[in-house]
Every structure is written in structure tokens, then in C-alpha cells.
Image: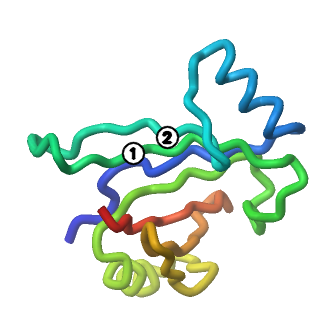
Amino acid sequence: MKRVTGIGGIFFKCQDPEKIKQWYKTHLGFDMDQYGAKFEWQQGEDSINKGYTLWSPFSDKTKYFEPSSKDFMINYRVENLEALVEELKKEGVTVLDNIETYDYGKFVHILDIEGNKIELWEPID
């Protein structure tokens, strides 16, 4: 069974998300939306099937990364999230919440052995 297939996003805390987005747009050319910047790429040799990695600043007051006290969170793309979560539970991995489904995919959060919160995402491509 495949587990992680790629990095879905890099999320980090900052004092002023809008200001930092503007800085990255101005100085590094990031194309921003309400969440941050999407870096599109081609999946495999099929140039029609695109994916993306999201770069997203969060307020330094966000609770979204809890229970981790770290200033970052990595989102990993996965296949078959339900099966993966069952395997992770069997392996003793801390699963923080139930799988949630949105228009753009399924999500769940886990902790690694150092207490870093990790977001697992099964995208709807």
C-alpha cells in the first residue's frame, strides 16, 4: 500500500499573514490567493493530470497546529486515506481527529513521535 505520495503543503505561523503574503508576492513573485500560493506540477507523464503544493502562512495566534507547539505543519498527499488511518492506528500512531471530507479532498491529522502535527490529505484530482 502506498502511504505518502508527495508534499501537499507547507504551513507556518507568522505575525501578519497578509503582510508576509504581500512580501513574498512582491519580492519572490508568489501568485497568492486567500490561502497562500499554489505551486502546480504535472503528475507523472500525463500532462493533463496536475497537482499542486500549497504554501500557506497562518497567524501566530492560530490554534490549528495544536496540540503541537511548533510553528509549522507539513501536509502530505496520500492515497486511500481510510486504509492508511487504519494501518496507522494498528501501528500505535496518534490519530487526532476523524477523517473530514471537503470538495478538494479528505483530511486527517496525526502526531509524529516528537509531537509535530501532520496533516494527511487525499486530494480529489
Residue 15 image point, x, y percent: 89, 38
- Position above or below: 86 against 1: below
**Label 2 Cα neighbours within 10 Å, binned few <14 / some 14-19 / many ≥20:** some
* Residue 27, label in figure: none
Q: In this view, does 20 lie to the left or right of 52?
A: right
Is 91 in front, or is 121? 121
Q: Could you classify mark 1 by the number of other residues whose Cα lies within 10 Å: few (under 14), some (14-19), or many (20 or more)?
A: some
Name the residue carrying label 1. 52
Question: Which residue is at 9% across, 41% downward?
Answer: 45
Total marks placed:
2
Q: Residue type at mark 1: give it.
A: Tyr
Identity, as a three-letter code, of the amino acid under mark 2: Lys
Q: Residue shown at 58%/71% (left/top)? A: 109
Which residue occupies the foreground of this view, 119 or 58?
A: 58
Q: Name the residue under label 2.
A: 38
- Are the two marked residues, 2 and 1, in contact with CB atoms closer than 8 angstroms? yes
Is 15 situated left or right of 96 in this image?
A: right
In the image, is residue 98 above or below residue 7?
below
Please state, as top left, top right, bottom left or bottom right, where the N terminus lies in the image.
Answer: bottom left
